[in-house]
Image: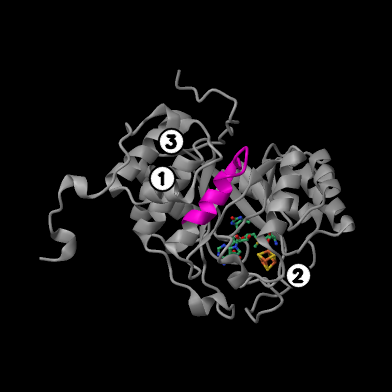
Amino acid sequence: MSEALKQSPASSRSTPQKTPADASETVPRSDWSESEARALYDLPFPELLFRAQSVHRQNFAPDVIETATLLSIKTGGCPEDCGYCSQSAHYKTGVKATKLMEVERVVAEAARAKAGGATRFCMGAAWRSPKDRDLETVCAMIEGVRGLGLETCVTLGMLTPAQVERLGDAGLDYYNHNIDTSRAFYPEIITTRTMDDRLETLDHVRRGGIKLCAGGIVGMGETVEDRIAMLVILSGLDPHPESVPLNMWNAIAGTPVIDKAEPADAIAFVRLVALARILMPKSVVRLSAGRDGMSDETQALCFLAGANSIFTGDVLLTTGNPDRDRDGKLLHKLGLKTAALRPQLPQESCGCH
Ligand code: SAM
Ligand code: DTB
Ligand code: SF4
């Protein structure tokens, strides 16, 4: 008999003895330790999913998925050396560098995304940080996209407090800035900036009153400990990011990560989604890059574990995403509907009283 099939006494594993839907698990905490997070991650799978789903239901409608559509407004030629990215000028990935798009074209793309059902439009630029002249153009894009009644998100690299203020004046709703991985693994992936640089921009954005979208990537050769440590850093932000994108690395030939990458096992990925849901109970958890290579069943488990947002449209920035037809069929099969989700700030009631 294999080791996995041997019976073990119920007491052989230390399962935290709380009721699964313990209300204390839905009050956002910013002091989770790595050992607490690891104990949750290692729970028997049904127990972990039950807890995550219980937390999810106390904070969100269980059948609603938020949809955002991405557009690369300035592609490639980036001076940063992020070892996973198709857009870094350091690697030969076949991605052609472009200039910043024209405002009218961006607004037209946003209108198409809205017609396709998206409630948020996210614009990404391959910059280390924006030049002030380019920021003015991005502000015009934000104003145009807002004018269509869409939520806006941009991801432009590192920002100064003055740049955050300018984006806030333009009416920006969310700023995406990922920490990507753990503090220990970070220098193996990126050398042109540090984790602290990333955290500093997140702090500027938070202080500037713009909602935070911050997450990371799995499947770049990091350990399970690195993945958990990444979530612990995110859950240490006070308040938590309103949006937490979890990306499965979309393999890019020509990047250094291709030599060390190991795709995350689907169950390990679902465990991570569940952990994100429990550590950050009121944050919207987005099942981001990597869905193209995921089965319907894996995605369904991710939704059960507490993911409640996806990118829609057949391209992300430079890589593929399931088309609207496949997503429509999947959501229909699962009986899920799409709608904007209002982030619940920590001081607000969870709505369960
Ligand atoms: N240059 C800006 C920055 O780095 O913040 C914005 C664009 S950058 C492409 C946005 C995020 O996309 C990265 O922080 C990373 O987490 C994610 N990303 C980039 N390439 C990816 C890939 N191949 N697979 C999954 N996620 C990726
Ligand atoms: C995020 O966490 N994922 C998105 C968005 N934020 C900007 C980007 C995914 C990029 C996937 C690789 C590509 O398409 O180039
Ligand atoms: Fe540039 Fe962003 Fe890609 Fe890094 S992740 S190379 S900063 S576009």
Mark 2 residue type: Thr
> What x and y, as percent, mark residue 265?
37, 63
> What x and y, as percent, mark residue 72?
68, 60
Tell me the magenta residue range: 228-243
Whether the residues at callouts 1 and 2 have beta carbons within 8 Å, the answer is no
Q: Which residue carries the number 3 mark? A: 56
Q: Splitting the image into 4 quarters, where does residue 216 fall?
A: bottom right
> What x and y, as percent, mark residue 195?
66, 60
Viewer-side label of 1, 3? 3
Mark 2 lies on a secondary structure that is loop
Q: For this view, does 106 lie left or right of residue 4?
A: right
Vertical comparison of 147 with 263: above or below? above
Q: Residue at x 57, y 36 (%)?
A: 340
Viewer-side label of 2, 3? 3
> What x and y, as percent, mark residue 53?
38, 38
Q: CA distance from mark 2 to mark 3?
A: 41 Å
Q: Splitting the image into 4 quarters, where does residue 238 fall?
A: top right
Mark 3 residue type: His
Q: Which residue carries the number 2 mark? A: 98
Q: Which residue carries the number 1 mark? A: 303
